[in-house]
Amino acid sequence: MRASFLDEVPISGVYPERSFEPTGECGWVLFEPSPARAWLGAFGLGDFGCRTVLRFGATENFLVVADGRSYVVNASSGELVYKPTEREIAAALAAPDRDLIIGCDQTAVFALASRSLVWISPEVALDGIDLLEVSSKEVLGCLHTDEGMYRFTLRFDDWQLLQGEPLELW
């Protein structure tokens, strides 16, 4: 089971198509639950952020982030499972072997499961967050604050966001 953003607008009629809030320019994702059942999704774009498609563990659900606007879609049925509306997503990483994706915007970190928001931090950064690495137990990243840049660890067992020492940039 695969899904990926396409670099160009596809030729109409090659695959069945489904629309998810299409307005103006869209992002196109090819879903392949199996080669014989491939289909295209047209996704309305947000104002900023990344374009990515991430799978929720071993589920059939994928998080589609289209320039920040997000959708959770079932690849087999083609149905919208839910639309996260808490924040526009600037970056996201899938936790391996878990029904969990960690995302962030410019000021907060959040955790999404394939059917709902799991956790959201208070505002912890002023000018951006970098997600660096994710495991099945935690995510590591950097917070950009008015006092500098700090590493952080977010543990999934107790949802503790631990701020580390400041990073020396020079």
Image (cartoon, rainbow, N blue to C red):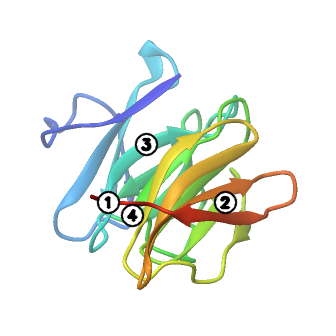
Q: Which kind of residue does numbered mark 2 sit on?
A: Ala
Task: Characterize the local packing of mark 2: few (<14), some (14-19) or many (20 or more) Cα atoms within 10 angstroms.
Answer: many
Label located before the other in sequence (3 or 1): 3
Label located before the other in sequence (2 or 4): 4
Q: Is residue 63 visible?
A: no
User: Residue 119, position in %: x, y?
Assistant: 73, 67
Q: Secondary structure at mark 1?
A: loop
Residue extending furthest toward the top:
35
Q: Which kind of residue does numbered mark 3 sit on?
A: Val
- The alpha-carbon separation of the residues under discs 1 and 4 comes to 22 Å
Q: Nearer the viewer, residue 32 or 96?
A: 96
Task: Characterize the local packing of mark 4: few (<14), some (14-19) or many (20 or more) Cα atoms within 10 angstroms.
Answer: many
Residue drawn at (87%, 59%) of the image: 158
Q: Secondary structure at mark 2?
A: strand
Label located before the other in sequence (4 or 3): 3
Q: Secondary structure at mark 3?
A: strand
Please tell me whether mark 2 or mark 1 is closer to you in this view: 1
**What residue is shown with label 1?**
169
Residue drawn at (23%, 28%) of the image: 14
User: Residue 3, position in %: x, y?
Assistant: 42, 32
Q: Which kind of residue does numbered mark 4 sit on?
A: Ala
**What residue is shown with label 4?**
90
Q: Going by the image, does 60 lie left or right of 63? A: right
Which labelled disc corresponds to residue 107? none
- The alpha-carbon separation of the residues under discs 2 and 4 comes to 13 Å
Q: Secondary structure at mark 4?
A: loop
Q: Which kind of residue does numbered mark 1 sit on?
A: Leu
The quarter of the picture where residue 99 lies is: top right
**What residue is shown with label 3?**
53
Evaluate if marks 3 and 2 touch, with contact meaning CB atoms under 8 Å apart. no
- The alpha-carbon separation of the residues under discs 3 and 2 comes to 16 Å
State whether residue 87 is above or below residue 43.
below
